[in-house]
Image (spheres, rainbow, N blue to C red):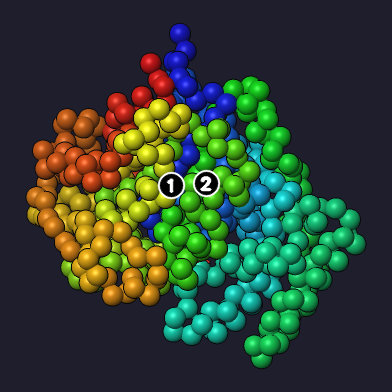
Amino acid sequence: MPTRHTLAGQFIDIHDLAWGDQGKGSVALKIIMFLQKLGIQIRYAWKPNGANNSYHGGRKDDGSSIGSQILPLSVFADGVNAVISPGALVPPADTVAEMQRLSEQGVDLSGTKIDGRCPVVLPVYKDVEQACEQLMGASNVGTTMKAIGQTYAFRAFRFGPRMYDLVDTRERAVQKVSLAYNLANAILSGCGLEEQSFDIDEILEPIQELEQYVTDTQDILKAMRKDGEIGIIEPGQGGLLGNIFGTYPGVTSSLTTVAGMLGQAGIPMDMVAVIVPIIKAYFTRVGNGPFPTEDKGMVGEQIRQRGGEYGGTTGRPRRCGPIDFNLVNYQRELNYPDPINNNENPTKVVSAITKLDVLDGMEQIQYCDSYGNPALHEPPADIETWSAIKANFKTIPGWDQTSGIRKHDQLPLEAQNYLHLIREKTKIPIGMITNGAMLSQMIIMEEMLKAFGIH
Ligand code: IMP
C-alpha cells in the first residue's frame, strides 16, 4: 500500500534563516530521496530567487561530488524537474553551460521550465556592478560579481529585458536590450568609465538554446493542484541576506523571507504544507557586514577547515563562529507560523540542523543567546547599531563523534544535549539532522514524519 501523507498539491519550503550556505540544496535532496524510498515522489523543484550567486553542493554515497548554482540541486534526484520561477534571474550563457554539465553527469533536464518573466542578466550589468562596488569604496558589499543586484535593479527601473522579450522577434530583442544598454552606459559614463556596445547575436545565441524551456510557470501550479503533484522550494541565499530585513547594505537584492520568496515565485501561501528552516550547527557568512558571533581566532579557523567553509561561487574563506540564537529567533518571528501559540496553523514548521559532525571533537561548544552593548536579544533595526553589538557567549560540553550515526538516541549524550538546547532556544521542533555531506548521512526525526502527515 502506498504511504499516506498530506503533501499532495503542495510544497515543502526549504528556508535558510542565516547568511546562506547552510546546506539548503543537500537538505532538499536528502528529503526528496527519503520520500522516494517511501514511494512519495517530488515532481518540481522551484528556484524562487537569485541565480549563480549561490552554490548548492553535496556528495553522493559513492563519494562523488555534485553541485549546481542556477538549477536547484534537487534535480539530481530522479523524476524532479527544475522550475526557474519569475523571481529568479537567467544568466543565459551560464545557464546553458550548467545544463550541459549536469546533462553530462546523467541528469535528465528535459522537463526544465523557465518562466518567461525572468529577468535576463546582460553582459553590461557586470560593468555596472564593478562601477557600483568601486563607488562604495571600502564599505562595498563584496558581491559575488554575478550582476545579481544590477539585474534586479534594472527590473525595478523597468529597463531590463525579460525572457519573453528575447525569445520573440529580433526587433523586440534589439529594442529591449538597447534600452538597458542606454541606461547602463549613462551610469558608466557618469562614473568616468568606458561605454559598452552589444552584439545581439552573441546575446541571443544561448537564449535560443533555452527557448524550448520557456513557459508561464503559473500553469505548473494549476497542474500541481489538479493532479496532487508535490513540489519543493529550494531558494538561493538566506533570511539575513534579504534586502529589507537582512544586514543591509551587506545583502543580496532579492527578498529572502518565506513570504518574499513565495511572492517573487508566484506561489500562493496555501500551497505551502511544510516550512523547513535550516539551522547550521554554527554560523558562517561570506562578504561584508555585521556578524556578532564571528570568531577570528582558532575556533573560527577550526570550523572553517573541518566544515570546508569556503564560498562555493567565489572560493572566498567564509567567516565562521558559534550559533547565534538571537538571530535564529529574529528570523523565526519574521518568517514562520508561531509554533507556540498557533498549533492549528495548516503550515507546519520543522527545522533541519545541518553539519552537526563539523563540531565533533570540540571540547566545548560555544553559543550566544544575548548581546551586550546594548543589552538585547534580537538585532537592532538600525544597522549602524549592529557594529557596536557584543555577543555574550556561553558554553556547553562537546562530544567525540556524531558522523556515521543514523539514530538520534545513538548520538553521544552531549550531542543530544546540544540538539535539545537548539530545540529549546529556537522553539522549533527538529525534523532532521545532517551529520555528513553524503546523501545518506542524516537522521530523520519523528517530527518530520508528523509534519509531512506520513502514517
Ligand atoms: P550578490 O548576491 O552577488 O549581490 O552578493 C551580495 C551579498 O550576498 C554578498 O555578501 C555575497 O557574498 C552574499 N551572497 C550572495 N549569494 C550568497 C549565497 O548563496 N551564499 C552566501 N552568501 C551569498
Where is mark 2, residue-wise? 259
Image mark for residue 79: none
Residue visible at 25% across and 62% down? 376
Where is mark 1, residue-wise? 335
Q: Tell me where residue 10 appears, x and y as whole percent.
A: 54, 30
* Element under disc 2: helix
Asked if 23 appears above or below 222 in the picture, the reply is below
Asked if residue 111 lies left or right of residue 209, the reply is left
Asked if 72 appears above or below 42 in the picture, the reply is below
4, 108: nearer the viewer:
4
Residue visible at 34% across and 40% down? 351
User: In the rendered structure, which disc, 1 or 2, sits on the residue that comes first in sequence?
Assistant: 2
- Give the amino acid type for the residue marked by disc 1 in the picture: Asn
- The local crowd at label 1, few if under 14, some if 14 to 19, many if 20 or more residues have their Cα within 10 Å, is some
Q: Tell me where residue 386 appears, x and y as whole percent.
A: 33, 70
Residue visible at 49% across and 46% down? 258
Asked if residue 11 lies left or right of residue 433, the reply is right
Residue visible at 30% across and 43% down? 353
- Give the amino acid type for the residue marked by disc 2 in the picture: Ala
Q: Residue furthest top?
A: 1
Real-space Cα distance between discs 1 and 2? 7 Å
Q: Tell me where residue 222 appears, x and y as whole percent.
A: 68, 30
The quadrant in which residue 388 appears is: bottom left
